[in-house]
Image (cartoon, rainbow, N blue to C red):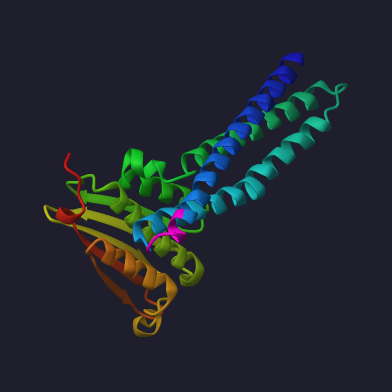
Amino acid sequence: MIFFIVISVLLILALVVFISLIIYRYQQKQNIYFKDIEALKTSHQNTLLQSQLEIQEQTFQHISREIHDNIGQKLTLAKLHLNTLNYTNTDKTIEQVNDSVNIISEAINDLSDLSHSMSSEIILNNGLIKALEFEVAQLAKSKIYKISFTAGGEPIFMDAHAELVLFRIVQETLNNIIKHAAASQISIDLHYDKTLLTMQVNDNGRGFKVNEAVTGTGLQNIKKRAAALKGCLHINSKINDGTQIKIEIPLYANSTNI
């Protein structure tokens, strides 16, 4: 009995330390974020910097929602279990402590995922492909979409800022799908050849009339970012027959020498 209680207390203490570190890192990133905003305001419009800021802003919003809705709920449930321990009923107490340990372990895993997604570091450190794999894994957790990701050809590292812009394009496209498409299946495909990167995002949603929607903010942002990378944007969509967003980026203009 005492062993289980000690284990639960140690786990809670570890979780408190972990949360404190997450919040500290979050505050550091937020301070940098606000400094970057001021720099953007005092300079000419910079598409690459703007994309990085938007990635950070979306990440901050995601972290806030996850902490409030998911992790907070789990910790509240664990606290309820521990506050209602009945020391006269050994079997029931052991069960409640075990449940609390499992819940706290899940919360720690969720916090670990959040710590990896707190900024664009995953792109800068691991490249576009790893960042997209992580993004897909996060979206798959919702169990709302059947989502897949493939990368073909011979992948190469592009300029870090170019990969940030491409990542933002995918985020913008996924955001449009979530908000408007009512889709159940999503696929993201990258293909590298000697001179060209082709990135394609498909969904099986409700579709739209391209001529009417091309002036929308989301699609305009995607088009602007593709143009910043000297790329071409192709949009195919039919009512009730899904949408295909295809972007072709010249590698020779955006790749790094590695």
Q: Is residue 186 left or right of residue 197?
A: right
Residue 62 locus on image (x, y percent): 55, 52
> Is 78 located above or below residue 135 in the figure?
above
Give the residues drawn in magenta, as a range. 39-44
Residue 172 locus on image (x, y percent): 42, 63
Residue closer to the observer: 18 or 83: 18
Q: Residue at x 41, y 46 (%)?
A: 120
> Is 72 located above or below residue 84 in the figure?
below
> Is 82 located above or below residue 72 in the figure?
above
Q: Quadrant of residue 79?
A: top right
Residue closer to the observer: 124 or 193: 124
Number of callouts: 0
Residue closer to the observer: 16 or 89: 16
Residue closer to the observer: 32 or 150: 32
Q: Is residue 116 magenta?
A: no
Q: Is residue 7 visible?
A: yes
Q: Residue at x 47, y 48 (%)?
A: 138
Q: Residue at x 69, y 45 (%)?
A: 73
